[in-house]
Amino acid sequence: MDKPLPLSGIRVLDFTHIVAGPQCTRILGDMGAQVIKVETEQALDSLRMSPIGIGGEAGPNRSGLFEYFNRNKLSVTINALHPSGLAIIKKLLAVSDIVIENFSSKVLERWGLSYDEQVAIKPDIIYASITGFGHNGRDREYSTWGPTAQALSGLTLMSGLPGERPAGWGYSFLDHTAGYNAAIAVLMALHHRNNTGEGQWVDLSQIETGMVLTGPQILDYTVNNNPYRRQGLPAGNHATHPKVAPHNTYQCKGIDKWCVITVPDNQHWGKFQNALSSESWVHNEKFQSNEQRIKHEAELDTLIEQWTINKTPHEVMHWLQSFGVAAGAVQTNADKVERDPQLRARDFFVEFLHRETEEYYETDQFPSKFTVTDSSVRQGSPPIGADTLEVLQTVLDLSTEEITSLYEEAAL
Amino acid sequence: MTKALEDLTVLEITDDKGMYAGKLLADMGATVILIEPPTGHAARHVGPFASNIPDLNSSLLFWYNNTNKKSTTVDIQTDTGASIVRDLVKSVDIVIESTPPGYLESLGLGYSQLSEINPKLIMTSITPFGQTGPYRNYEASNLVLMAMSGIMNSCGYDDLPGSPPISCDGLQGYATGCNLAVIATLTALYHRDINQEGQWIDCSIYEALSGTTEAAMPNWYFNKQTPFRQTGRHHGVVATPSTQYESGDGKLINGFDIPPRTVARWDALISWMDETGMAKELKDDSFRQMIRERSRDKDKIDIIVLRVREFIKSMPAEEAYHRAQQIRLAWAIIRSPEETLQDPHFAEDRQFFGEVHHPETQQSYKYPGAPYKFHKTPWSIDRRAPLLGEDTLQVLHDLLSFTPEDLVLLRESRVI
């Protein structure tokens, strides 16, 4: 028998778009919640327009980026600005457990769906709003994309080579992170609802979800008065705390091929020496304590790179790991999907049927294994409005005539 | 006010990989008992340290990640210590641990053993690669996981030839693993709320990070392409213009959305630039037409970037940031973490930072706040991270009815 999905029976009314909100509802959907994504043809989720096409062409129903974040969800098209459309949204809200949105802070209010108005419709509703800056405060109308939020939170500056401009993050890390924190928040709110019957509003600021990740750096300033903006920081891929060496990226054989090697203490230095026993320099007196290795870090890095440069990243990784040294290949998406035995062994990848092309593709699962419950990818992402009819019939018991008339008055 | 998780007791046996998961639960009201070896949790040995003086009770990494927890020293490698943990497990809801696969089992503390004592137990095991598979015993570090997961392949420089992929400072890989471990734990808690049934969760940080790379994975699944690194902005399969602009006061602006994607934002930008006569040829309608048609003329884009670069250079960073945001351009100052303390939106209006009192120094320090604002069940730091073993007496007395004499004996035999 299939294992149960933990959130089956939970209904989510999903007004999210782009990545941060959809990341949250993707997780809830994977866990079995029925996620009803409310969309309009007039203002498509911009992820539907991503250039990553499926089946050789791009388009709103063939966007790879949209697919990745919206599997398992149902798409209903409803025009919230039309009174009859808004009435349908309110009926759906009355039978939902959770409302999630990542519009700018005034949109739901403008529709007449502020938290207080939601409560009037569904007293125990759990409402999660995700914005760049949160729903209160002087800058609440400002907008963010991932790189904006990363820059303001301090995370961009913390990533880079010493003496160079920041490298930052090469994608919207904080879109994922805001989505993860929103999932944590609604699940905590569900537990509270289970205990007390009480719903609530959780207000997330994407920038704050990034500032939370700079805790030790903030404390170094508020306790010690050490600003992060100082000589030598960020330290590239060298270790900052604890300061250990070697701890870096090393170039390998091929174009833009890299591995990382980290040696935390003398015990592991011994293992590293065993792995490189043919290299006389590993026994050099000046590398025999962590303190000395840090002092001679540049020379040590050069010697290590002379050893890695003729090997592939995976050769370095497997060789060093066989001696108990923490080493890893800097892997690409292709390395992970096509060649990684660990992710395959754990069924990290799963096939699903793409709804528009009716072809099978792979994607990645929720990243944990459970002994009792399960997560699943039951179907691909919805073509725009593909589930309107079914949702209105099965969830709201509307008749075909009622639905036809809603279409005719352009409420759907 | 009621806290969302105040009915829960969590037993935590972690090192630096898993401690952030316990913090997320403790700050929302769970009682989190941190089991530490008598030599102290791994993070106690890692700086920065308060007043820059290394001490088991002064690690700021430990301070930040262990707020609200109760420290109980137990040497779980001794039979008596393991049996104390088994007794504690009778009265906890959740165990969070980040020891190597098979280690707790070898001490009689694996899920199969603990679930016999407490069938409703939720046990969350956080490991680098998971409990199974050929890499399960591979050695890891935060950097190794950032590399293997593909995150680093997307982060670095396109304007520094030959430069390596870059991993952000801090334990970002571990924190992300913990975010996903807490999500997994809370779904199991929901299942237990309804079905009275516990379970074991096997969390792989490697997998958590492998799914945290935005367009990289779908680019492979659907197009078999690998995006390349670009400084401070999205990885891509097509090169995009640099987004780092220097302001007049020598700071960096992340100038996202240049050229703007909508005509409205384009018009607003041009009229702002024209206030000081810096729009120059950008006022020519051919530029506006390119925006309207969403076409990309490389020569025109180069001119736009050049003029915007001159424009941002003509003003302080704060002005560039706020004026841009007021016309809905999502620009940002590239700030240092401590500079966020001075932002009145977060510091004053949102009250993001909180003061945490440390009785040892009789001082309060500002800490970052919560990643979410709950309107009914508060997040709060009620107590600073515990001193080593600070709560051993109270925990063993309250939960296991140990007497002070018992504790003296345990201490003498170095179990606690």
Image (cartoon, grey):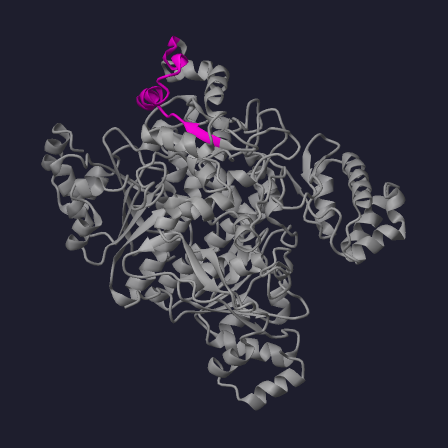
Residue B8 in the figure: left or right of residue B305: left
Q: Is residue B231 above or below residue A242?
A: below
The quadrant of the rendering that contains the N terminus of chain B is bottom left
Residue A376 in the figure: left or right of residue A36: left
Q: Nearer the viewer, residue A291 or A137?
A: A291
Residue A18 in view here: yes
| Residue at the outermost top position | A285
- Can you give x and y, in whole percent of width and height, for residue B37 in the image? 24, 33
A271 within the magenta span: yes
A154 within the magenta span: no
Q: Which of B254 and B225 is in front in this view?
A: B225
- Can you give x and y, in whole percent of width and height, for residue B376 in the image? 44, 60
| Residue at the outermost bottom position | A401
The quadrant of the rendering that contains the C terminus of chain B is top left
Magenta stretch in the rendered image:
A259-285
Q: Which of B221 and A115 is in front in this view?
A: B221
Q: Is residue A223 above or below residue B333?
A: above
Q: In which quarter of the image is residue A402?
A: bottom right
Number of labelled discs? 0
- Can you give x and y, in whole percent of width and height, for residue A122 in the image? 47, 74
Residue B97 in the figure: left or right of residue B171: left
Q: Quadrant of residue B265?
A: bottom right
Residue B178 in view here: no
Residue B313 in the figure: left or right of residue A306: right
Q: Quadrant of residue A156?
A: top right
At x 15%, y 47%, the residue is B87
- Can you give x and y, in whole percent of width and height, for residue A392 in the image? 52, 81
